[in-house]
Image: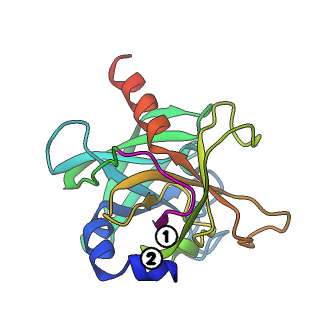
Amino acid sequence: MDARSDHGPQTWETAHASVVSVLPTWPGYEKPGFGAPSGVAPEGSGVVIGLDARDESRWILTAAHVVNRATEIVIKPSDRLSQPAKVVWLDEDSDVALLEVREALPALTLAKQSTLSGEHVCALGNPFGLGVSMSCGVIAGPNRQGIGLNRIEDFIQTDAAINPGSSGGALVNAKGQLIGMIAAIFTKDADIDAGVNFAVSVDLLIDRVQRFQTR
């Protein structure tokens, strides 16, 4: 069965408004045209999550490596205006960061059920700075640890297409619920997606966010 048969317009409609492009400015990228085409540092992605039961939120999860050197951050939803964001918490051990924005955005529902190998999933992010896009695949393996990417690891491995710029984006199930945050491409050749990709599991994301809430 084609992975796309379990996903389509409904998955996109459910999830895309909660995924944003993250546009950081890093030292050395201040001049337009230097480095990235837009004059900012290489772009990333983020996913709006609710820290309470509300449908909208001002909190955005992203990968720590996307924003850990940023002097300024702007986020761009797919169908709303850009707005500034600030880092309120960053955990390099798990490569997770939390941003805050002024205007609330639709929050993505967190999946409560366990993920299974072979389950159909979709990755939403900002590949190559093209804007929020979606690709689909399957879970190759849940609960991957000992990969050597982060000190604290609980990854979901997937073959859904992930490329530079997607880091910090959402991995969702067929219902459009968040099951992971896009983290890394596993490849020996830079910028080439070999179909071995990793997302930080929603369980680890919840654990890290709860640490932020109770600090």
Q: Residue at x 77, y 40 (%)?
A: 148
Position of 186 with respect to 161 (left or right) is right
Q: Are marks 2 and 1 in contact (CB under 8 Å)?
A: yes
Residue drawn at (39%, 32%), measured in percent from left and top? Answer: 209
Find residue 70 and report its horizontal and vertical position in percent: 54, 47
On whether residue 120 falls in the magenta region, the answer is yes
Q: Main secondary structure of the magenta part?
A: loop
Q: CA distance from mark 2 to mark 1?
A: 6 Å
Q: Which residues are magenta?
A: 113-121
Identify whether 5 is placed above or below 195: below
Rendered position, 65 above or below 163: above
Instruction: Name the residue that disc number 2 marks.
Output: 133
Q: Nearer the viewer, residue 93 or 158?
A: 158
**Front one among 55 and 73:** 55
Q: Residue at x 24, y 70 (%)?
A: 80
* Residue 205, placed above or below residue 23: above
Q: Is residue 158 magenta?
A: no
Identity, as a three-letter code, of the amino acid under mark 1: Asn
The residue beneath circle 1 is 126
Viewer-side residue, 157 vs 200: 157
Q: Which quadrant holds residue 144?
A: top right
